[in-house]
Image (cartoon, grey):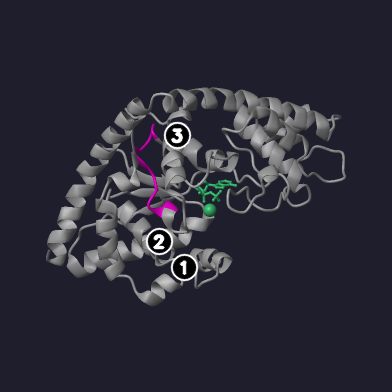
Amino acid sequence: ASRPRVLSGIQPTADSFHLGNYLGAVRNWVAMQETHDTFYCVVDLHAITMGHDPALLRQRTRVAAAQLLAAGLDPERCTLFVQSHVPEHPQLGWIMGCITGFGEASRMTQFKDKSAKQGVDRASVGLFTYPILQAADILLYQADAVPVGEDQRQHLELTRDLAQRFNRQFGKTFTVPEAYIVRDTAKITDLQEPTAKMSKSASTPAGIIELLDDPARSAKKIRSAVTDTGREILFDPAEKPGISNLLTIYSALSGRSVAELVEAYVGKGYGDLKKDLAEVVLEFVRPIQERTRVYLDDPSQLDKLLAVGAEKARAVAAVTLQTAYDRVGF
Ligand code: ADP
Ligand code: NA
């Protein structure tokens, strides 16, 4: 039997991915290459919904792709592409928008959150319709599964509703995707505010570890991570969120279980844990940084990889779009 197909995207809205992105998303993408038929895209169309700088966007899109390759995406085994290279995304997005209720779209809580930050009068219509484009991203590839975090659940529900609605109204066209809940997905929290998630938009620089950051700076951030006034190194996210977060990161990057780490640090202090974790992070980011640089130093090779990815993606997307066009009467 063929493998279930998966579609996932990541926004090129930062100069580097952070450990939360890696441990919560990218690491799973790499693993899913073994079990799924994988389509991964750098969603640059989504990255312009809140205002942007063109040169920076272009740079960040390339850096995002280079980091994904450096982290283990293999263009021989997955389809890695840039969303704007595949015009079928906004084309299907328009159709999806025409079967979405205005009230239905208005209930998306992420828009409410993000537009509240900007002021609703300054929020773009693109930010409002972004979950509809996201539905098109997924449906174009007939994805069976979509890895989702808590913050994306509502958007996946919308995608499922739209797929079912279209199929009912115009005839079976789209696979209705399921949420793919990844076991053991690490939730990484902010180093300075250990009850909040590590986030490129919400965290201060001191709260996030970036994959491409200078390791000395990352080590300093780890040393300065907020912990509690106790002394014991225990995994207890409610009472000891800071230490627990450091243990989670340590465990995920080293492959040692949290229990094993707790055992190993009996009688040792927070400083010891932080010092060792800084070393683990350094060992982890070094090869990723080196490989990222290799991709960025050879722009024509990176362009070629992304062009091949876009071609593979379009081969699937164009077929789905043609069917959808036929069904709606174009
Ligand atoms: P951010 O929250 O920093 O803006 P994104 O929303 O672009 O990051 O997230 C990209 C991917 O990384 C998503 O799949 C998201 O679930 C995952 N992710 C982001 N932050 C974390 C975190 N702190 N812990 C685990 N996963 C995360
Ligand atoms: Na987010």
User: Secondary structure beneath disc 2?
Assistant: helix
Mark 1 and mark 2 lie on one chain; the one further toward the N terminus is 1
Q: Which mark is residue 131?
A: 2
Residue 1 visible in this rendered orientation of the protein: no
User: Secondary structure beneath disc 1?
Assistant: loop
Q: Which residue is mark 3?
A: 68
**Which class describes the residues within 10 Å of circle 1: few (<14), some (14-19), or many (20+)?**
some
The Cα–Cα distance between marks 3 and 1, rounded to whole angstroms, is 29 Å
The part of the chain drawn in magenta is 33-47
For the C terminus, the quadrant is: bottom left
| Outermost residue to the bottom | 103
Q: Which residue is drawn at the image coordinates 74% and 52% (left, top)? A: 238
Q: Which residue is mark 1?
A: 108
Q: Is residue 1 above or below residue 275?
A: below
**Which class describes the residues within 10 Å of circle 3: few (<14), some (14-19), or many (20+)?**
many
Disc 1 marks which amino acid?
Met
Q: Give the x, y percent position of residue 220.
A: 74, 33
